[in-house]
């Protein structure tokens, strides 16, 4: 079931008001079995994920197709491709998300808009291709944590921030992808080409 599925092709104040999760919608979400709630996709799309640094602090950024649910971020080689890993969000809060300083302009543009998610067990660094896209991912992760805790007030605060900061020219089809379920085994797989891998040197 979709709980975050804008339908028009342009973002407007009226539309954003209509996408607010009502108390009834949140109740319906919580009434689902736990395994279905955990599997409900809130947002998905491409991000760069930073790998472990090797010799000379050399960090490799790899494009990963990321899927956000109320309990985790899963990342894949391609959409509906091989799952490479997941990050548990159940013990995270708003302090777990860290916006990192922008890199030097000598670095690739793609590594300028970075954010980290700190969990009790690990730290993962992602990079978006633009500032608006980075902000959308951060708001989406806040939304996921609020849904997991049944915090309707926080959900609405996140949506209000979305309304105030999203410009009218924002391409909704690009930045508000329609949530979908993972394709069942054996079905056709659509592979969207990821961005190029980036190698970054840190000094």
Image: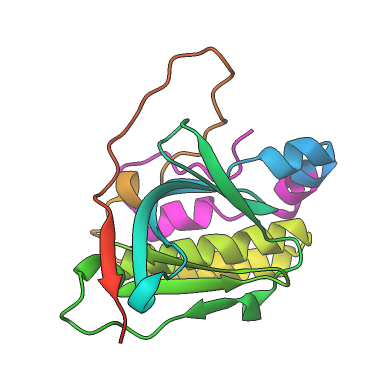
Residue reaching furthest to the front: 55
Which residue is at 59% across, 19% downward?
Answer: 184
Callout count: 0
Residue 167 visible here: yes
Q: Residue at x 27, y 64 (%)?
A: 199
| Residue 168 falls in image quadrant | bottom left
Q: Is residue 164 magenta?
A: no
Q: Nearer the viewer, residue 33 or 21?
A: 33
Colouring? rainbow
User: Is residue 102 depicted above or below 166 in this figure?
Assistant: below
In the rendering, at what x and y percent does residue 83 appear?
A: 54, 39
- Observer-nearest residue: 37 or 24? 37
* Quarter of the figure that contains the C terminus: bottom left
203, above or below 129, in the image: below
Q: Position of residue 170 (x, y in %)?
A: 27, 58
Left or right: residue 5 versus residue 176 is right
State the residue in front, 154 or 133: 133
Q: Is residue 85 found left or right of 161 in the rendered image?
A: right
Residue 38, by quadrant, is top right
Q: How far across and how far down the image is residue 156, in percent?
A: 62, 65
Residue 19 horizontal/vertical position (percent) = 53, 51
Q: Is residue 166 visible?
A: no
Q: Residue at x 31, y 81 (%)?
A: 202
Quadrant including the N terminus: top right
Magenta residues? 1-27
Report the front residue among 173 and 54: 54
Q: Is residue 4 magenta?
A: yes
Identify the residue at horizontal 61%, vertical 51% (top origin): 86
- Horizontally, residue 147 falls left or right of residue 188, namely right
Q: Residue furthest left?
A: 106
């Amino acid at each position: 079931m979709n709980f975050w599925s804008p339908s028009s092709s342009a973002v407007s104040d009226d539309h954003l008001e209509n996408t607010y999760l009502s108390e009834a919608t949140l109740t319906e979400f919580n009434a689902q079995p736990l395994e279905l709630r955990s599997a409900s996709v809130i947002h998905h799309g491409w991000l760069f994920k930073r790998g472990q640094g090797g010799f000379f602090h050399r960090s490799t950024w790899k494009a990963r197709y990321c899927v956000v649910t109320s309990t985790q971020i899963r990342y894949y080689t391609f959409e509906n491709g091989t799952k490479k890993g997941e990050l548990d969000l159940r013990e995270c809060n708003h302090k777990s998300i860290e916006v990192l300083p922008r890199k030097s302009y000598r670095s690739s543009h793609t590594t300028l808009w970075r954010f980290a998610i700190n969990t009790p067990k690990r730290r993962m660094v992602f990079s978006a291709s633009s500032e608006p896209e980075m902000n959308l991912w951060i708001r989406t992760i806040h939304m996921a944590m609020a849904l997991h805790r049944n915090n309707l007030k926080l959900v609405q605060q996140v949506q209000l921030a979305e309304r105030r900061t999203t410009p009218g020219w924002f391409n909704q089809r690009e930045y508000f992808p329609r949530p979908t379920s993972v394709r069942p085994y054996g079905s056709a797989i659509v592979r969207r080409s990821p961005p190029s891998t980036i190698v970054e040197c840190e000094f």
